[in-house]
Amino acid sequence: MGMRGLIHFAAALGLAAIAIAFGRWLRDPAPGGPLLVLAAAALVCALALRRLYRTGGPGRRVVAARVAEPEPEPPADARLDLNRAGVDELRRLPGIGPVGAGRIVEERELHGPYRSVGDLVRVAGFGPSRVRGLGNRVRAG
C-alpha cells in the first residue's frame, strides 16, 4: 500500500471513528469521553485529507503543475514567416495539420499578406486562443 492508500485508510478510519463517537454522543450527550473521541477523530480525518490534497501532495496531479509552466520562447529569428512559409513548413508547427496549413496559404493568396500574427484569425478554424498559442513560433513579415 502506497502513501496515498495509507492516507485514504487513515481518513476512512477517522470517518468511522467520527460516526461511532457521534452515535455514542447522541445517546449520551454528557461532556467527556465520546465528545473527546469525536473531536480527536475529526482532527485525524482532517489532517490525513489535508496532507493528501495539499499543494504538491500525493493526491494532486503533477500534470497541473506542468501546464502552468510557460513554454520557452524560441529566438526571434527562428520564428516562421507567415507570408513566405509553404504548406510543408506550416505543418511542422504544433497543432497545424495539412488542412490548417492549406487554409493559411490560401487566405494569404486571396486577401494579401498577413500584417501581424493576429491576422491569422481571418483563417477559418483559427480563433484568438489558437493564434495566441502560435504567437511565439510565427511572425508576419
Image: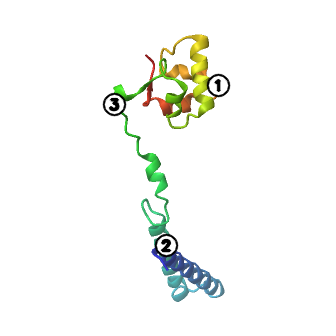
Residue 85, given in percent of the width and then of the height, sits at 49, 22
Q: Between 35 and 130, which is closer to the camera in this rendering?
A: 130
Residue 93, given in percent of the width and then of the height, sits at 49, 34
Decide if residue 19 is in sight here: yes
Q: Between 28 and 83, which is closer to the camera in this rendering?
A: 83
Residue at 61% across, 19% down: 106
Residue 116 is labelled as: none
Residue behind mark 1: 124
Residue at 47% across, 76% down: 2
> What amino acid is at disc 3?
Pro
Mark 3 lies on a secondary structure that is loop
Residue at 48% across, 80% down: 40
Residue 75 is labelled as: 3
Q: Quadrant of residue 28?
A: bottom right
Name the front one of labels 2 and 1.
1
> What amino acid is at disc 1?
Ala
Q: Quadrant of residue 26?
A: bottom right
Left or right placement of residue 11 versus residue 136 in this view: right
Looking at the image, the residue that sits furthest to the front is 88
Say few, some or many: other residues with alpha carbon within 10 Å of mark 3 (under 14 / 14 to 19 / 20 or more). Answer: few
Residue behind mark 2: 4
Say few, some or many: other residues with alpha carbon within 10 Å of mark 1 (under 14 / 14 to 19 / 20 or more). Answer: few
Residue at 56% across, 83% down: 17
Left or right placement of residue 82 versus residue 101 in this view: left
Mark 2 lies on a secondary structure that is helix
Q: CA distance from mark 2 to mark 3?
A: 42 Å
Q: Between 17 and 81, which is closer to the camera in this rendering?
A: 81
Q: Earlier in the sequence, mark 2 or mark 1?
A: 2
Mark 1 lies on a secondary structure that is loop
